[in-house]
Image (cartoon, rainbow, N blue to C red):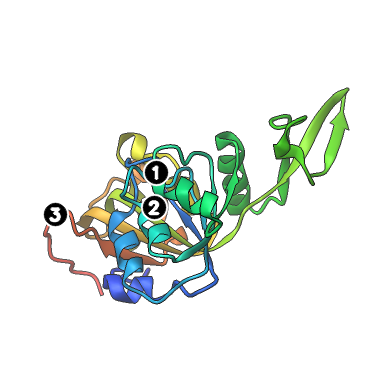
Amino acid sequence: MPKNKVVSLEEAISHVKSGMSVAIGGFLSQGEPRTLIRGLLETDATDLTIYACTGGFKDQGIVELIVAGKVRKLVASHIGTTPAIVKAFHEGTLEVLLTPQGTLAEQMRCGGAGIGGFLTPTGVGTVVAEGKQHIELDGVTYLLEKSIRTDVALVRAHAGDAWGNLRYRGTARNYNSICATCAEYVIAEVEFLYNPGEIDPDSVHTQGIYVDAVVRSDMTYCGKPLSCD
């Protein structure tokens, strides 16, 4: 029988160590694992490399980790709504690698699927192509984009059970579903926590086999007692 993966925030986030790579779900303020991000702020982990679609929104989200000096490098598609990240980049305290949104998503998906990389015409002839292998097929030039695997992933789900099965709500599904497959250790915060079997299997977006730890979101939860061991 699968084990109960529900743990405290402190226990879950203790798996993030200095120098690690971390994939974080969300898009701007939608679907960010804020409980896990703020838990990470309380640790001594630094020199992190973050993979995410955006850097958060205004002064909240991933940008909080950057302001706290915990992040060495950010690989993202958009940082325009987080002035503090732009400032850190111009001051030389943060390395930023901007990656086309579809390319970044596919890199993570390939990492989760065990695929080494993929070919895309996106970025050919631009700075995105610098240092990358070019491959021509049927008269079209493509870039070889390598897949992304990270040490840890932080994701947020609307509902989840003690075995780690997750269900996202609306657009919060965004990068959370692919981040949950591309990491060696996956931590999920859930808004509504259920016992195994209470979530319709057909509605599960991320299966529990991918998830290593489940944390209750500090915003709200259903309050049902867990009967599993």
In the foreground, 154 or 60: 60
Q: Nearer the viewer, mark 3 or mark 2?
A: 2
Task: Name which residue type carries label 1.
Answer: Thr
Work out which quarter of the rendered image holds the N terminus and state it.
Answer: bottom left
Q: Residue furthest top?
A: 139
Dots 1, 3 in contact, CB < 8 A: no
Q: Quadrant of residue 149?
A: bottom right
| Cα gap from disc 3 to disc 2, whole angstroms | 29 Å
Dots 3, 2 in contact, CB < 8 A: no
Mark 3 or mark 2, which has the lower sequence index?
A: 2
- Say above or below: 205 vs 8: above
Q: Residue at x 75, y 38 (%)?
A: 129
Q: Secondary structure at mark 3?
A: loop
Q: Which residue is mark 2?
A: 63
Q: Which residue is mark 1?
A: 82
Mark 1 or mark 2, which has the lower sequence index?
A: 2
Q: Residue at x 33, y 54 (%)?
A: 33
| Cα gap from disc 1 to disc 3, whole angstroms | 32 Å
- Say above or below: 92 vs 18: above
Q: Residue at x 15, y 54 (%)?
A: 220
Dots 1, 2 in contact, CB < 8 A: yes
Q: Which residue is mark 3?
A: 222
Task: Name which residue type carries label 3.
Answer: Cys
